[in-house]
Amino acid sequence: MGKDIVKTGSPDTCDTFCYDEEIVNRVQPQIDKVQGVELIFKALSDATRLKIAYALTLETELCVCDVANIIGSTTATASHHLRLLRNMKLAKYRKEGKLVFYSLADEHVHQLVSIAMIHSKEGVSNGRS
């Protein structure tokens, strides 16, 4: 264990500063594995893009025009957000004549959005906001 320093603080922090050196040495070298993952959450932190991703969990694929109508925007705005999701490797597209259809990139993205939705609902049902 590290040195103990007594301090006073808020109820959600430790009253004594100490750490388990073995745990720190085991975890710290692996912490850089999160590099780049924050970009996924940044892309999904935008309400419009999250709505689009959620819509794509409800339907296998959607035309840009459908997405625009679902989120109440222009096709240009929908295309902008879909392009960003595609560039972040969260969505993919296919063309059929003059139409462009988008879907989630893979099952991992579907699970990520679905789990976030479930977690959000659990927080409300457990009295958290």
Image (cartoon, rainbow, N blue to C red):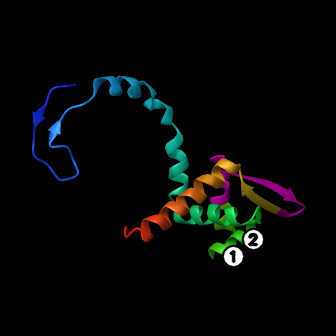
**Disc 2: CA contacts within 10 A as few (<14), some (14-19) or many (>=20):** some
Residue 88: within the magenta?
Answer: yes
Pointers 2 and 1 in contact (C-beta within 8 Å): yes
Q: Quadrant of the C terminus?
A: bottom left
Q: Residue at x 33, y 23 (%)?
A: 22
The answer to whether residue 119 is left or right of residue 9 is right
Say which of 8 and 94 sits in front: 8
Say which of 64 and 124 sits in front: 124
Please state the horizontal and vertical placement of residue 124, each as a whole percent of the image.
43, 70
Q: Amino acid at mark 2?
A: Cys
Q: CA distance from mark 2 to mark 1?
A: 6 Å
Please state the horizontal and vertical placement of residue 15, each as a whole percent of the image.
14, 43
User: In the rendered view, would you say 106 is above or below 99?
Assistant: above
- In the rendered structure, which segment of residues is drawn in magenta? 81-99
The image quarter in which residue 54 lies: bottom right
Q: Residue pushed farthest right?
A: 97
| Residue occupied by mark 2 | 65
Say which of 15 and 29 sits in front: 15
**Disc 1: CA contacts within 10 A as few (<14), some (14-19) or many (>=20):** few
| Residue occupied by mark 1 | 69
Which element carries disc 1, helix, strand or loop? helix
Residue 98: within the magenta?
Answer: yes
Q: Residue at x 49, y 44 (%)?
A: 38
Q: Quadrant of the N terminus?
A: top left
The answer to whether residue 72 is left or right of residue 42 is right
Q: Is residue 61 visible?
A: yes
